[in-house]
Structures are given as structure tokens and as C-alpha cells.
Image (tube, rainbow, N blue to C red):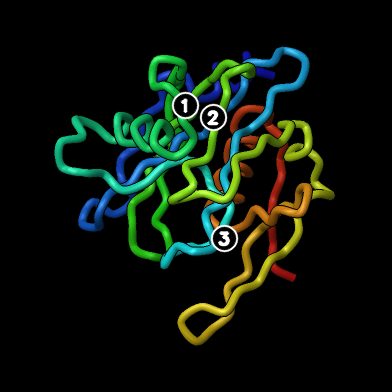
Amino acid sequence: MLNKIRIAVAGQSYPAKNPELPHSAILIPVTDSKKMPELVLTKRSDLLSRHAGEVCFPGGKWEEGDPSLEYTALREAEEEVALPRSSVEILGQIPSVVSRSGLNVMAYVGIIDSEVELRPNPGELDSVFKVPLEYFLEGKNIQAYSIQYNGGAITTPSYRYNGNVIWGLTAYMILDLMNRAFDAKLSFTVK
């Protein structure tokens, strides 16, 4: 599984969807377990003013002084889950997206040691957890998730895993990676 991810994203680089918008970067951490690689996800604190309680990948806004967006993704992962930058092997990117809050989100895929101890920053996160890649490859696990936003309803793909709902951009990025790396032909349509 890891080799397929390596081949699919190795050296891939994509421009920002909308260069006029502020930039952010996330890390899609994949554990190096040959038996069962996993994606690392976080659950944001319920006390945050934005995106409270949502499941996402480690990441955040580009800050002045960050030499690159890849650096931003690694810095944020270290701040949020205590993932040392030196223990991440960045493979490449998947295409960027624009968030509903108006940010360009650049997504970097990286391999991490499955034994590295991850600790959620209590000021930002309630938890950090892992999900086997195989779970995301089963089409039956993709469900619709609807939220009210700006006076209307938005429906996105979602996954439910151990009491966590993974939806929105995070779910779209997971779908993209699964299709790109494993030719999974997974899709999501609103019914």
C-alpha cells in the first residue's frame, strides 16, 4: 500500500486553487506500517471559535517567516500533535482546494513512523487518532453528511469511525488520495 502511495504522489506539486486567497497547508500523515498503514487525523477542540469539534489533518495558516507551505504543514503538525519534522518523509502533494472559510489549502502527503508518539496540543485539539487505509477503500463507508452554512445546506462525503465524523475537505482529500493511489474509483454523489 505504501508503495502505491509513493508512486502516486512522489514529487507531485500543484498550484494554489485561488492565489488571491490566504494560504494554509496540511499534512496527510500515513504511518509506515507495512501490515496496515493508517492515516493520522485530529479532532479539534470544542472550545475553538472556528471549526470547533471538526476532524481534520494537522495543519494551519501560513505565517510570515515560514519559508514554504511544506514548512507550514510540518510546523503545524509539530505544534498540534508533537510530530517531529525530522520524522516525516514528504512524498509530494495532492491538488489544493479552497476551504469554505476562504483559504487555499495545500495538502502534503508524508510517511511517518507508526511507532512515533503523537500527543494532541490541548489548546487546539481534543484528540489525535489513526484510521486504517483499508477502511477508506471500502465504498460502503462513504456516507452523505449535511450541514447548514450561510443560510443553505451543504452536503459532503463523510466517514464515521469510532465515534468520529470525518467530513468536508478532509473527506474529499481522503477520497482523492484513495483514488489517486489505489485507482479505487470511489465517488460521492448527493442523492
Q: Name the spot of residue 62 as percent of width and height, x first.
A: 26, 44
The mark nearer the N terminus, 3 or 2, is 2
Q: Quadrant of the C terminus?
A: bottom right
Residue 41 lies, with reference to residue 91, above or below; the image says: below
Q: Residue at x 69, y 56 (%)?
A: 165
Q: Which mark is residue 83?
A: 1
In three-dimensional space, the C-alpha distance between marks 1 and 2, rounded to whole angstroms, equals 10 Å
- Farthest-out residue, front: 122
- Label for residue 182? none
Q: Amino acid at mark 1?
A: Leu
Q: Which image quadrant: the N terminus? A: top right
- Residue under circle 2? 29
Question: Helix or strand or loop: what does disc 1 sit on?
Answer: loop
Q: Are marks 1 and 2 in contact (CB under 8 Å)?
A: yes
Q: Which residue is mark 3?
A: 53
Image position of 132 (left or right of 25): right
